[in-house]
Amino acid sequence: MTVNQQQLSDAHVLVVGDVMLDRYWYGAVDRISPEAPVPVVRITREENRLGGCANVAYNVVSLGAHVSLLSVVGNDEASHLLEDLVSKTGITPYLGRDDQLKTTVKLRIIGRQQQLLRVDFENTPQNEVLASQTDQFMQLLAHHKLVLFSDYGKGGLAHVSQMITAARTAGKVVMIDPKGSDYSRYAGATCITPNRAELEQVIGKWTSEAALIQKAQALRQTLQLDALLLTRSEEGMTLFDAEGELHVSAQAREVFDVTGAGDTVIATLATLVAAGLSLREAMPLANKAGGVVVGKFGTATVSFEELMA
């Protein structure tokens, strides 16, 4: 089963989680510093992009669906840059403000077409701001078919368990891009999408495909999930559900940059499910989207035309 643009334009996705500003400073590297054995980068160009769950939301809107973005930012330069970027995309933002919070910024310094250094600026939001986000979430729930929680472990999803319960009670599909070693907080979701390293943190290493199947299905049942989608980079991806396992191989292409590829995969999966596809029908297209986006530099998105090409 495929999907058309009309079905996508009827889909409404609510993205909740940690927003970030991705900054790129590009420069020329001509010499080593006399002060320390490090390259001197002469910055020639700067670029700002949506990061974290804002990039997830941008991926949803790039496919032609409607998306609302619920998150918390500081009251700083980075938050205003973020809001300005969001306003140009078609995303409907619901951004709480916390004067004590530093908006998360990931600054990447690029020289000779490669990342030389990443500098992170961040702290954790106050609980009061997160509580107000839960109220806003309850109001938004009625207008969306699917909720996508994008967890970057920055504190924006302190109340995720209550939100999952509320969404499932309201009959919504709930997808989660998880973080950390304790997945009990995601219990009852429709689908979680860990990558290899993230899943290993929770179930330990596996020595064979049979061992992986046993451990992944046991985790799925313990957490009462409909499905678990494991993204395996060059090995493609595997869906574990009540019917068993479904595997799709990676789309062979040159990998230029894996930044944000997981965002694209879960955003595509969520958008297609919100448009009426099942997880099993949506997965090969989400896999294709991941293959397209690793051929682009930095946090990037995939269009409907690229997906259907």
Image (spheres, grey):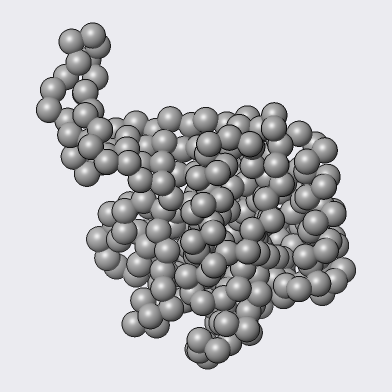
**Residue 71 in picture, x, y percent from top left:** 67, 50
**Residue 228 in picture, x, y percent from top left:** 63, 63
Using the image, determine if residue 218 lies above or below residue 130. below
Q: Residue furthest top?
A: 35
Left or right: 194 as drawn, with respect to 50? right
Using the image, determine if residue 24 lies above or below residue 277. above
Task: Tell me the residue at 36%/76% (across/down).
Answer: 306
Task: Tell me the residue at 65%/70% (across/down).
Answer: 13
In the depicted view, which residue is nearer to us: 233 or 97? 97
Answer with the quarter of the image where residue 45 lies.
Answer: top left
Using the image, determine if residue 53 lies above or below residue 290. above
Task: Tell me the residue at 53%/36% (across/down).
Answer: 77
Left or right: 306 as drawn, with respect to 205? left
Picture mark count: 0
Left or right: 115 as drawn, with respect to 94? left
**Residue 8 in picture, x, y percent from top left:** 56, 82
In the depicted view, which residue is nearer to us: 100 or 134? 100
Note whether residue 194 is visible: no
Left or right: 264 as drawn, with respect to 306? right
Quadrant into which the C terminus falls: bottom left
Task: Tell me the residue at 50%/86% (across/down).
Answer: 5
Note whether residue 82 is visible: yes
